[in-house]
Amino acid sequence: MQIETLYQKYLSSTGVTTDTRNIAAGNIFFALKGDKFNANKFAAEALDTAAFAIVDEIDNADWKNKYGERLILVEDVLKTLQQLAGYHRGQLKCPVLGITGSNGKTTTKELIAAVLSKKYKTYATKGNLNNHIGIPLTLLAIKDDVEFAVIEMGANHVGEIASYCDYVRPDYGLITNVGLAHTEGFGGFEGVVKGKTELYQYLGTYKGKVFLNLDNNILTERASAFGFGVSDINSVIGYGTLPGAWCTARIKENKDFLSVGCVEDGKEVVVRTNLVGEYNFENVVSAICVGKYFGVGIDAIKESIEAYVPSNNRSQKIQYGSNTVILDAYNANPSSMTEALKNFAKITAQNKVVILGEMMELGDYSVTEHKKIAKAVSDMSLTKRIFTGSGFGFLKNDPAFIYFEKTDALKDWFKQQQFENCYILIKGSRKNELEKILKD
């Protein structure tokens, strides 16, 4: 079936889905398959509710007679989903901002969306739908009355961001930072830089604009390599602490929460966030910069950022009895782990406890990077140092640390402790599910 024909069916549908558990009447169901699942087998079940099912295998020969044109056979369901998303993107009139980076993508996306929503009808990536399936679904959820779209793009190998740009076609781009993350797929730090800056490469080719952290020398050099003049406001909107930045800001305070001071009409405006840690500074100032560039007033920018409260286990500051907990259990890599530890070390408290889970997808870098983190923790003044996951398995018999192979065992131990008036950092990759230790 031609994409143009399928697009007409999409326009008359109630939306698209890839999950039989949340099909709404009138949806188009895309039967994706992977190494451990094959949704083609559930096409008939989907068609009990969906208007159409897109498949690349027909599990039962009787289905064609039973469902007729409602069962649409294509060569590759995933590719068809991406092509449909790209076709829809071509019909949208709103500008699209693409965001990627090793750390802070989601927080930055949420802050920018909150700021832009003060002036524009804005649609932003929901949750963690930032991969080869989630991004097409995000694009297809954008209605024609949307005035601004913010698309988060994750990646764990070279070429991935470039492939997303083929159908996201961003007009603007922002890379939060580059660090040691997903090195198993990227093959090392240089691979991370190459992969993430594919966004710059696309924007350079198609005359887009970049929001650039001028404090980040690596990103500044890579942007220049792709033809962006750092001082050219027609292609680069710079932000950071440097006086020459289009949007300048500084850390005003970093005690309980981060406060940022930004310059507006020669005066400093202080934005008091609900975010923990200096590492969130670049996320906040990027949102201020984007908002200012697109004409959102500074008062509205301040209001939207100050109203944002992190969720989903991302740098959440919560009370657990008499204890204060920084829960940052959504993800972790050597870069974000190091920054979290640096910030925690600056906190003044008598009883400080660190609970860390292993970092995933590091490949050949895994042993070295986990040992670096353990060394950093050993050098800190702490009441207890607790680790879980096979990445930290070398600490099993070290009396200076408390080690658990699995999070469930850590949870059982944690519940038996009498932590009182402690400051606790909990951080690890998503696979560890460290948030479970706080739940009953």
Image (cartoon, rainbow, N blue to C red):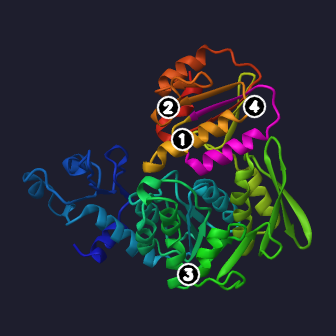
Q: Secondary structure at mark 4?
A: loop
Which image quarter: residue 318?
top right
262 displayed left or right of 315: right
138 displayed left or right of 216: left
Residue at label 1?
A: 370
Can residue 331 be spotted in the picture?
no
Residue at label 4?
A: 381
Q: Could you tell which of marks 1 and 4 lies nearer the N-terminus?
A: 1
Looking at the picture, how far across and down is residue 387, in whole percent?
A: 56, 30
Question: Residue at point 57% right, 81% down?
Answer: 225
Q: Residues within 10 Å of mark 4 (few under 14, many from 20)?
A: few
Image quadrant containing the C terminus: top right
Residue at label 2?
A: 394
Task: Give me the C-alpha separation between circle 3 and circle 4.
Answer: 45 Å
Check disc 3 and give the amino acid type: Phe
Task: Look at the image and give the residue range highlighted in magenta.
Answer: 332-356
Q: Secondary structure at mark 2?
A: helix
Task: Give me the C-alpha separation between circle 2 and circle 4.
Answer: 21 Å
Task: Give me the C-alpha separation between circle 3 and circle 1.
Answer: 34 Å
- Between 233 and 350, the one lying in front of the other is 350
Task: Give me the C-alpha separation between circle 1 and circle 4.
Answer: 19 Å
Residue at label 3?
A: 226
Check the image and report above or below for 277 versus 3.
Answer: above
Q: Could you tell which of marks 3 and 4 lies nearer the N-terminus?
A: 3
Looking at the picture, how far across and down is residue 327, in whole percent?
A: 64, 37
In this view, the mark in front (3 or 2): 2
